[in-house]
Image: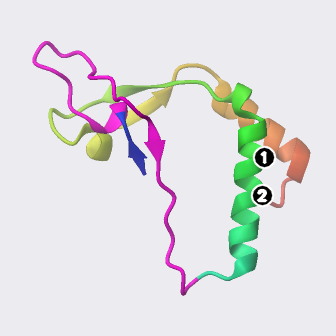
């Protein structure tokens, strides 16, 4: 869940209101998952952080006037999604 610029509404002139902090919340029910699930998630997040240079931007292609983060549609600004997926497959194979 993103908490930052993306989850705020635009100002009266239609400009983004930049957040002071950009946060991402990762939450999962503690009674459903085992420690191995959590270790797997930590490992993949660590991999993602190490490959953060491959991550590019997103822009709205459909943006409702309210709750844009919930109902809007985003599109990549470049081919970074494919590049990131290729790096993931190279490191972990097709089975992941």
- The answer to which quarter of the image holds residue 30 is bottom right
- State left or right for residue 45 relative to residue 22: right
- Vertical placement of residue 37 versus 86, above or below: below
Does the segment drawn in magenta span residue 8? yes
- State left or right for residue 29 relative to residue 66: right
- Percent x, y for residue 49? 71, 40
Q: Judging from the image, what secondary structure is the residue with disc 2 in?
A: helix
Q: Nearer the viewer, residue 23 or 63?
A: 23
Disc 2 from disc 1: Cα separation: 6 Å
Q: Nearer the viewer, residue 60 or 3?
A: 3
- Percent x, y for residue 56? 60, 24
Q: In the image, which residues are magenta?
A: 5-32
Point 47% across, 29% down: residue: 75
Looking at the picture, the colour scheme in use is rainbow
- Vertical placement of residue 42 versus 20, above or below: below
Looking at this view, name the residue that lies furthest to the left.
12
Principal secondary structure, stretch drawn in magenta:
loop
Q: Which mark is residue 43?
A: 2
- The answer to which quarter of the image holds residue 69 is top left
**Cβ atoms at labels 2 and 1 below 8 Å apart:** yes
- Percent x, y for residue 81? 65, 33
- State left or right for residue 32 relative to residue 51: left
Q: Which mark is residue 93?
A: none
- Vertical placement of residue 38 versus 32, above or below: above
Point 26% across, 38% down: residue: 68
Within 10 Å of the Cα at label 2, are there few (<14), some (14-19), or many (20+) other Cα atoms? Answer: few
- The answer to which quarter of the image holds residue 50 is top right
Point 16% across, 21% down: residue: 11
Within 10 Å of the Cα at label 1, are there few (<14), some (14-19), or many (20+) other Cα atoms? Answer: few
What residue would you read off at disc 1? 47
Looking at this view, name the residue that lies furthest to the top.
13
- Vertical placement of residue 56 versus 38, above or below: above
């Amino acid at each position: 869940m993103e908490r930052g610029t993306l989850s705020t509404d635009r100002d009266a002139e239609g400009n983004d209101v930049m957040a002071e902090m950009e946060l991402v919340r990762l939450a999962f029910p503690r009674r459903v998952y085992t420690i191995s699930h959590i270790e797997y998630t930590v490992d993949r997040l660590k991999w993602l952080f190490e490959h953060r240079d491959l991550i590019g931007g997103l822009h709205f292609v459909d943006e409702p006037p309210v709750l844009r983060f919930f109902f809007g549609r985003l599109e990549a600004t470049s081919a970074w999604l494919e590049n990131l997926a290729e790096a993931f497959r190279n490191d972990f194979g097709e089975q992941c």
